[in-house]
Amino acid sequence: MKNNQLTTPTAPHERIVLLDVIRGLALFGILLVNAPSLNSPIWISESDFAFKTNTWDYIVTNFIYLFATDKFYPIFSLLFGLSAILFMENMAKQGNDPIRLFIRRMVILFFFGAVQVVFIWWGDILVVYAVLGLGLVLFYKLSARLLLMIIYTFFLVLTMIHIGLAYYHWQNDYYPDEVMVEATDESAISESHEEDPTTATEISNFSNEDEMDLIYHYGSFMQILEQRLQDYYLVSLAGIVKPVNFANFIRYLTYYLHLFAIFLLGAWLQKRKIFQHIDDNWPIITNLGLYATVVAFITHLLSAHFDFFAEAFYPISGLSMGIVYIFIITFLFHKKNWKKPLAPFAAVGKMSLSNYLLSNFILSLLFYGYGFGLYSKIGPGTQLWITIAIYIGLFLLSTFWLKHYRFGPLEWLWRVLTYGQKVAMKPSTPSIIVGQIKHNLSDNRD
């Protein structure tokens, strides 16, 4: 039966501040990885960045690869699965149709992602989240025990498949990053960028991948838009629609299944109410953190020395490190001396959607030809300082914004379109985020 009562979003005092803190801190890791991607050709290896010119550039490149690459998107994916189940549970408690509202919520997220693909960056993840997120409705009513069995099965199968892929690559002297281009010569890239094309005609005459990447530096808005759509197709769809070979298809497929498996892990955390009852679940949290630390150490040690293990352990390597980060933040947040210094980062996390899109928009303006055209002109070292500056700006903006409004601008729009009704933007009392944090901190143990 349809319920005619008003649907209400989660009240500020009911939010779990720790989750917003984790999101807020994880966003910095996402920025560390996204900045080089916006300033690199799509075929540059994820373990390498373009336009390195000095020792500091190489140090930053290796630091980001070791501690950030593939470590932070699992955190957001896990929290996405958790939030999805939490949303459906809250809607059911209010007497609404949780599945119908969640599907509408994913459709709107898809729209946000599509806007980013077209106007901002080819590396968007929101479209994928929206499409895969729809599958969570099939697992919404499962018990935590059954869900955990399914998660074990997912990761076991994914790991076995990647071991097979690693063996295939080893036997054929083949590496995944060679799917798009047989070889990369960074010196050739740097030299090609020294020639400054001055007209759109010259740019349109480019014929190979090295030259086409110059479009991001010198191209017009429409030329960059067209190139961005082509790159999105190559990165996100080509391996499924038109794979180079069967191994290429399997690797693309397992990437999406891997994301969904992490969604399910987040769903399990919500089913067990891990973050709602930290004290009661502390043994589980501690065990997860310790097991993840051991797995992360072993997989990263082997992966750093052998390409075979880098491929074989892909489903669990980055995820295990992401869980370690979550455990560290959770542990520190529940210590008296760390709680207050960490709590302000909740503002960044509460506005994570707005901050994610805004940061990518800023980076696109800095690097692309229709903005400041810094593409290829700066290396990873300089990018690091830019990333830090952007994050500080997001932190200050989020803190200021949430002193006057209940939600971030896109978070508010997402709610309005999901519920199909007006949602109050301004709080009944000022500085609501401060009050929210104080209220929740008083309930946490020291």
Image: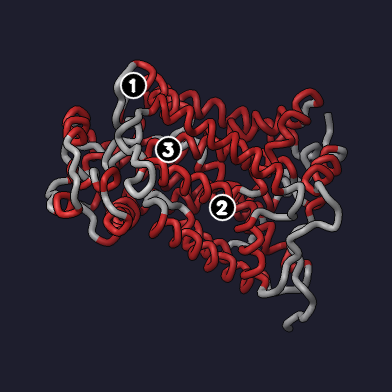
Dot in front, 3 or 1: 3
Instruction: Name the residue beneath numbered marker 1.
Output: 305
Label annotation for residue 264: 2
Tell me: residue 184, above or below residue 275: above
Q: What is the C-alpha distance between the residues marked 1 and 2?
A: 31 Å
Residue 356 location, x and y as percent?
53, 47
* Type of amino acid at the residue the image marks with label 1: His
Q: Nearer the viewer, residue 133 or 344?
A: 344
Q: Is residue 224 visible?
A: yes
* Type of amino acid at the residue the image marks with label 3: Ala
Q: Nearer the viewer, residue 240 or 50?
A: 50
Label annotation for residue 98: none
Q: Nearer the viewer, residue 130 or 208?
A: 208
Q: Is residue 333 left or right of residue 267?
A: right
Dot in front, 3 or 2: 3
Question: Do the numbered discs 3 and 2 sit on residues whose CB atoms are within 8 Å?
Answer: no
Q: Earlier in the sequence, mark 3 or mark 2?
A: 3
Residue 4 location, x and y as percent?
77, 81
Q: Is residue 369 left or right of residue 356?
A: left
Label 1 element class: helix
Residue pictured at 66% horizontal, 61% vertical: 412
- Density class for disc 1 (Cα within 10 Å; few <14, some 14-19, many ≥20) is few
- Density class for disc 3 (Cα within 10 Å; few <14, some 14-19, many ≥20) is many
Label 2 element class: helix
Q: Is residue 254 visible?
A: no
Residue 30 location, x and y as percent?
50, 39
Instruction: Name the residue beneath numbered marker 3.
Output: 35
Residue pictured at 49% horizontal, 56% vertical: 129
Q: Earlier in the sequence, mark 1 or mark 2?
A: 2
Residue 348 location, x and y as percent?
64, 42
Tell me: residue 332, above or below residue 350: above
* Type of amino acid at the residue the image marks with label 2: Leu
